[in-house]
Image: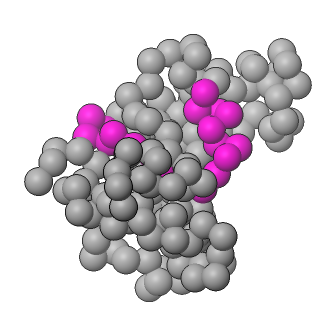
Amino acid sequence: MKNESVLLDTSFFINLFKINGAFHENAKSYWKYFLEHGYELKISTIAIAEYCVRGVIEDLPLRNLKIEPFNFDHAKKAGEFARIIIDKREQDSLELPKRAVVINDVKMFAQADLDPSVKFYATADANGQKMYSLIKEKQPIRFDYLTIFTPVNVTFATLF
């Protein structure tokens, strides 16, 4: 078993469960890859809250997931990350809400960054990648951002 994990975003689960969706097969392939390669699968309490807006918690495969609560250290780091994004928005008219708010994605980035086991943040959110890239330009970030738009065999150079 690896000592590495993946933090899965809300949009990952939405696509995993949307059987006729355009990226269902990709989400399923990532899920299978992570399990077969010994990654611990994690979900933030923030992602659970987002998922429960339209879904029910019983749909989430919680027996396969470690639940990561959002804590004090995550809040501090999320504030640092949000400052980078807000400053960029004010300088370059980045398309984000005009109020100073810490977006849920940024909170989960903080969780991923502070957890030494998290190697990947897996999502179906292309807009989140813009924020991730902005943060990474300004300071080191410990995890890689994976979107399920890219098939798993391309991401990991596998033959399946």
Residue depicted at 83% across the width and 15% down the height:
91
Examine the image and state in which quarter residue 50 appears.
bottom right
Q: Residue 143: x percent and y percent?
A: 40, 34
User: In this image, 61 relative to 135: left or right?
Assistant: left
Residue 14 included in the magenta stretch of the image: no
Residue 142 to residue 111: above or below: above
- Quadrant in the picture for the C terminus: bottom left
Q: Residue 17: x percent and y percent?
A: 53, 78
Residue depicted at 37% across the width and 77% down the height:
61
User: In this image, 89 relative to 56: left or right?
Assistant: right
Residue depicted at 65% across the width and 33% down the height:
131
Q: In the rendered picture of this protein, how many numbered marks are placed on residues?
A: 0
Residue depicted at 82% across the width and 29% down the height:
94
User: In this image, 42 relative to 77: left or right?
Assistant: left
- First to last magenta residue range: 115-133
Q: Residue 76: x percent and y percent?
A: 48, 30
